[in-house]
Each structure stands twice: as structure tokens, then as C-alpha cells.
Amino acid sequence: MRTGMRAVCALAIAALAAGLSAPLHAGSLTVKTEQGKAHGKTINDGKVRAFLGLPYAAAPVGDLRWKTPQPPLKWKGERDATAFGARCAQNHVFDDMVFMDSGPSEDCLFLNVYAPAGAKGNSKLPVMFWIHGGGYEAGASSEPRHSGDFLPLRGVVLVTINYRLGVFGFLATPELAKEGNGAAGNYGVFDMVAALQWVRANIGKFGGDPGNVTIFGESSGSYAVSSLMASPLARGLFVKAIGESGAAFENLLPDDSLEAQEAKDGEWMASLGVKSLKELRAVPTARILDAAKGIHFASVIDGHILTEPVTTTYAAGRQAHVPLLAGWNRDEGSFAAAVMTPEKWKTQAAKNFNERAPEFLTLYPGGTDEQATRSAIDYAGDGFIAFDTWKWIEAHVKTGDSPVYRYRFDLAALPSKYHPAAFAFHSDDIEYVFGALDTRPGAEWRPEDRKLSDQMMGYWTNFAKTGDPNGSGLPAWPSYSKDGLLIHLDSPITAGPDTLRPRYEFLLKGMPPSEY
């Protein structure tokens, strides 16, 4: 009897072991989407399956230029999904942007899916949907700093997308508004919604859970996250949100009417010597990009993606009531790091704030060159990123009916090729979140950098799984909405109250138009 039981137990253990190891090889490199079969590849020593360059919408070219995204075309046979699709047409804007695609094109509405090697169609893993930054003017899903090699190892499916940029993504003219039944512009944000709809329809085939999607982005990608939370067209397509350094709470979006944007963009169109939208759609890509250099094509209240100012939506509690994790970096204003003297700082304070200058100087002190320089960085960073992100967080705490977790990224990286000074600068956090530190050109990393990256990957993926970043082995992250505390992502990580609130309450009373 005992011998027989041992044999049965041995068989059971073998079967269990086989069952545990089977998922490591269960994920197929051929997946059938609604458009057709796609064949991907493995990356990171076979630990992750990557499906690159999948079209989520029809190519926005010809008559589809400056139209809302149309359904992607179906294909026959098996599509090669082992290389990135083209990045969206753009002018050179940022020196530190590196791309791994074949080049820019208007035919660019592609996304990439990264899944753990063992993920199967019934795995229902949380989905993290990344929106790249770049001021709505530059960037792509092929940047190595948001590589898909590592986050999927934390038990998530990662999706990264391209979306139309600059003049191709945000042009709004009277003729476009007429063609669009009163709506024009925001084509890049429409693209994001279309990509989310593609995820809803297809991500289950890759092992993801279409009912558990977290949108996250940095800079203009974070701006987009706050906008998608306000958009009726995106409602129900995601259940959690992460914003890194940016929010649609600055003056451009709430105050720029569609009519004002149409007038400005109409003048730009006339400068090309074309008289109709039909003629404009026939102008070559390169000529349009050349004519658009130095011009910002802004997001607007178009009546579809956004039906009212984002600030109005949040004030009324009409945004998506989803858990939010958001924050910014300590040195968002590091571009203002030139030496500032106390005399210059006092003069600037008086010029910008008049009778409020003494109060300003208590919040942004400048008694020494070092102190004045630090305050110049802080004020530039507040005007550029921090103040608007703070307003977003506060608004969602007040009316969002959902947990909110707030952070500040404080660990200053060592100087590198594109960032010659030691700052926690704008976009510094991206490689930490993706575990992609080694993709930064010319960077040297310390043990504390790698430890913080590991911790941030844990926080971000825990939040995607449960709506709470806390987990085993991580320093406790208190709820900002419940406890009023944020964490400082540093070495070590610490938690504390919002000591900068007086600065932002001062700025709420009014600040001069920002040059940032």
C-alpha cells in the first residue's frame, strides 16, 4: 500500500511540476488578432514575448490625414511582428530621444505588446498602457528608455503606442471643424482612444485582462492621462491611471477655445499658399513639417474628446473615478540652473508679483547665490510641471471618489551624455520605472539607482494589479487621499506631509504667464 501511495504521490508531484513549468513555454509567438495572425519574437533571453508594429488603426494618409482614426485593415496570412513600426512624422525636438524604428512616417499608428513568456490566452494579467511624452510634438514607442524587456517580468502585459504628433495630430481649422461636424483637432488623443479600443478587443489573446487596464504616461503622456480621465470617449476603457510629471490643468487647454485655435491654424494653412483642405492633404509630409517648425499645435476643447475644460470636469466630479498614482520630479526646472544672484532674484520677484513679492520670497528664498539658484530651479519647475500636476492630484482627491497615491522623485542621477549635471530632471524617472537604466547613453549607475528602479517597478506594477502600490518588501506608501502623505522616491524612500503646499496655494492666487 505504501509503495503504491508513493508511486501515486510521485506521479502527482511530476504532474504538478509539469503543470507549473508548462506556462513557461505555453505562450505562442503567433497570436490571432481581430485583424489577422501576428508572429512575434522573444526578448530578454526568452523571458518576454514581444509583438511589435501592430496596426491599431488605418494609416492616416491621403484623405484620412486629419481625420479621426479609422478601423485597421485586416490582412491574410501571418504578419511579421518582430520590428517596430514607423514613428509618427515629427521635427527634431529633443536631443535625448533615441529611436529603434525605421524612421518617421505619417503611416505610424502602431502599438507594441509585451507579455511574459508564459502568459496564455486565459492568464488575464493586468495591462499597462504606456503613452510616451514629447510635448505632443515628438517621441515614439520605439524609444529604448521605455523598453518592454523588464516590466512584464513583474506579471503584467505592457502596451506601448505611437500617436499623431504636432501639426498632424493637433491641427484645427474652420474647414476641419466643418468636416468634423463642429469638431477639429485632438487627432493624437483620438488615436489613444482607438488604441485603447484595440486593447479592449485583442489583449486577451496575449494573456492580458481587458477589464484591468492601467493607463500611464510621462510629461505630455501624463497630460494625456489626465485628459483621458476627463474624456467621455475613453470612459470604461481603463480602470486605473498613473501620471508622471504633467497634467492638463494649465492655461493652454482650459482657455484656448476651438475658435481661437482654428483662427491661428487657419493662418498657418494660408501661409503655405493652399486654399482648401483638399489642397492641404496633397502637400508632401516634408513640406508640412518644415512649415510647422517652431509652431505649437495645441490640444483644444473639441466637443468630442473634451466637451469642456478639464478643470471644469474635475471640479464637478465628472472625471473617471479610478485610482490615481501621480507625482513629479524634484528638479523639473533644472533647465533654469544658471547662477542666480539675490539681487536678480529680488528684481524678478518684484517684476512678476509686485506687492506679493515679499510673500513670494519667503516661499522661494534668495538670500545667497546658491539659495537664489535653487529657488529659480524650483519656481521654473513649478511653472513648467509641478503646479499643474499638484492641481490635478488635489482635484481628484476632492471629487474623484477613489484612492490617490502621490510621489516626488528625488534621487539625482549622475551626469550623463545629455544631462551633464546631477539633477532629478524632467523625464529622469522613465528608465527607473521601466527597469531600463542601461539604455541611457553615457550613464553610470550606483547600487542605489538600481535598488530604486527595482522598488519603483514594484510600486507601479502592484498599482496596476490592485490599485494600491504597496507590496511585500517595499517601504510603505501611505494614501495621499486618506492620510495626506506622499513618498519621496530617493535613497532611502521616505514618507511625509506635503511641505510645499504653501507654494502652490500662493500660486493659486495668480502667477504671470509662464515661458515654460
Image (cartoon, helix red, strand yellow):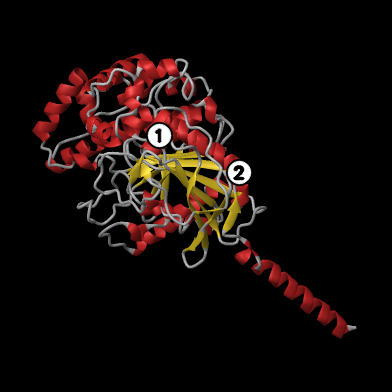
Q: Is residue 173 visible?
A: yes
**Viewer-nearest residue: 506 or 73:** 73
Query: Residue 356 vs residue 242: left or right?
Result: left
Q: Is residue 440 above or below residue 277?
A: below
Classify residue 168 by image quadrant.
top left
State the image coordinates of residue 468 (x, y, percent, origin top left). Answer: 55, 45
Badge number at residue 484 = none
Residue at the spot 64% in from the left edge and 56% down from the top edge? 120
Q: Which part of the image, by quadrant, shows the C terminus?
A: top left
Looking at the image, residue 258 lies above or below residue 205 = above
Residue type, numbered disc 1: Val
Quadrant location of residue 61? top left
Residue at position x 28%, y 46% in the image: 425
Residue 471 x/y as whole percent:
55, 53
Quadrant the N terminus occupies: bottom right
> Circle 1: is it few (<14), some (14-19), or many (20+) Cα within 10 Å?
some
Please give the residue where the numbered disc 1 appears in the rendered image. Answer: 61
Furthest residue in direction right, as rendered: 1
Name the N-terminal-most of marks 2 and 1.
2
Q: Judge by depth and name the residue closer to the eye, 44 or 361.
A: 44
Quickly name the residue at label 2. 34
Q: Amino acid at mark 2?
A: Glu
Badge 1 element: loop
In the image, 481 versus 264, the foreground residue is 264
Give the SS element for disc 2.
loop
Between marks 2 and 1, how big is the CA–CA gap? 22 Å
Q: Position of residue 230 (x, y in %)?
A: 49, 27
Q: Are marks 2 and 1 in contact (CB under 8 Å)?
A: no
Residue 505 visible at all? no
Above or below, 228 relative to 154: above
